[in-house]
């Protein structure tokens, strides 16, 4: 996809009045870029920012489309590793007021939190039995770090998928996996109402300290990570079915 935009005129702002057509052109690039990324090809997504910066309105539209595709939790193309180079380039672009860049700066900081192939940030948690422990003290080969909210319908679906997974049960039985279901909010009445809904083999917990809630960016709930023995992030905010597929094939 390196040459995809060579014939596109970024100075032609008439594209801005043809939103759907521009989005279709952008979507083809996104799909091709994602395919190349998953095939481990070298991808330079930040180049699109340099091209679009010849026109501030065009740059803003492209940044919006990139945000919707690569960052939106509901997007089938979500991929922070492709979004990060776009944000890095955008915050360096001249001619854009700092106040306008603040949103990009904030999103860049959050995207870089606990990113793929980095060591997940440690935190203390209190289990439903009142025990205090920390993420980095868990000694299993794999950790499913599952942020949930009680009463959340999608959380219920994710919980059931994990409960019904033969590979999860097999790994739990041999102590090779920890399922850490973490309630990230402050309302303990909701926490207490739903404690009995989880399997006894899981570690059900909440943050031990108020200031630890900012250590993980949670754009949507449920939010699921897969960590390895070294607490390295194998999957960040991933699809639970994809995570179980990885576990089964690892």
Image (tube, helix red, strand yellow):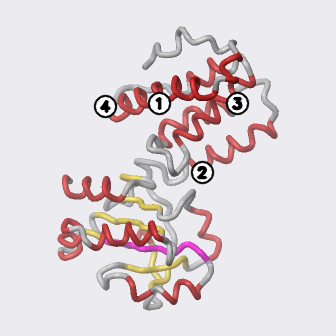
Q: Nearer the viewer, mark 1 or mark 4?
A: 1
Residue 26 is situated, as x and y percent measured from the top left of the image, at 53, 26
Residue positioned 38% across, 68% down in the render: 157
For the N terminus, the quadrant is top left
Where residue 99 sits, quadrant-wise, is top right
Measure how far apart labels 3 and 2 are at the Cα level: 20 Å
Determine which residue is flagged by label 1.
30
Name the dominant secondary structure of the magenta segment.
strand
Q: CA distance from mark 3 to mark 1?
A: 17 Å
Q: Earlier in the sequence, mark 4 or mark 3?
A: 4
Q: What residue would you read off at disc 2? A: 110
Note whether residue 144 is visible: yes
Give residue 60's mark.
3
Numbered disc 3: secondary structure = helix
Q: Earlier in the sequence, mark 4 or mark 2?
A: 4
Picture residue at 48% right of the left edge, 49% below the top: 115
Q: Residue at x 50, y 50 (%)?
A: 74
């Amino acid at each position: 996809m390196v040459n995809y935009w060579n014939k596109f005129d970024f100075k032609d702002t008439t594209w801005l009045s043809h939103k759907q057509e521009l989005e279709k052109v952008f979507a083809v690039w996104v799909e091709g870029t994602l395919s190349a990324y998953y095939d481990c090809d070298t991808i330079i997504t930040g180049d699109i920012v340099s091209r679009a910066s010849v026109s501030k309105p065009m740059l803003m539209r492209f940044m919006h489309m990139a945000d919707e595709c690569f960052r939106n939790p509901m997007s089938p193309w979500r991929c922070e590793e492709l979004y990060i180079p776009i944000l890095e380039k955008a915050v360096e672009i001249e001619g854009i007021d700092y106040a306008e860049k603040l949103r990009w700066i904030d999103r860049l900081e959050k995207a870089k939190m606990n990113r793929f192939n980095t060591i997940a940030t440690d935190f203390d948690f209190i289990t439903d039995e009142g025990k205090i422990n920390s993420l980095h003290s868990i000694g299993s080969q794999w950790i499913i770090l599952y942020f949930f909210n009680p009463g959340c319908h999608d959380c219920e679906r994710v919980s059931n998928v994990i409960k019904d997974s033969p590979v999860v049960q097999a790994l739990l039985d041999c102590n090779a996996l920890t399922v850490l279901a973490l309630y990230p909010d402050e309302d303990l009445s909701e926490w207490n109402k739903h404690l009995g809904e989880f399997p006894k083999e899981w570690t059900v917990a909440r943050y031990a300290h108020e200031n630890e809630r900012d250590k993980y960016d949670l754009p949507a709930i449920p939010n699921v990570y897969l960590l390895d023995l070294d607490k390295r992030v194998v999957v960040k905010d991933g699809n639970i079915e994809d995570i179980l597929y990885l576990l089964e094939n690892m």
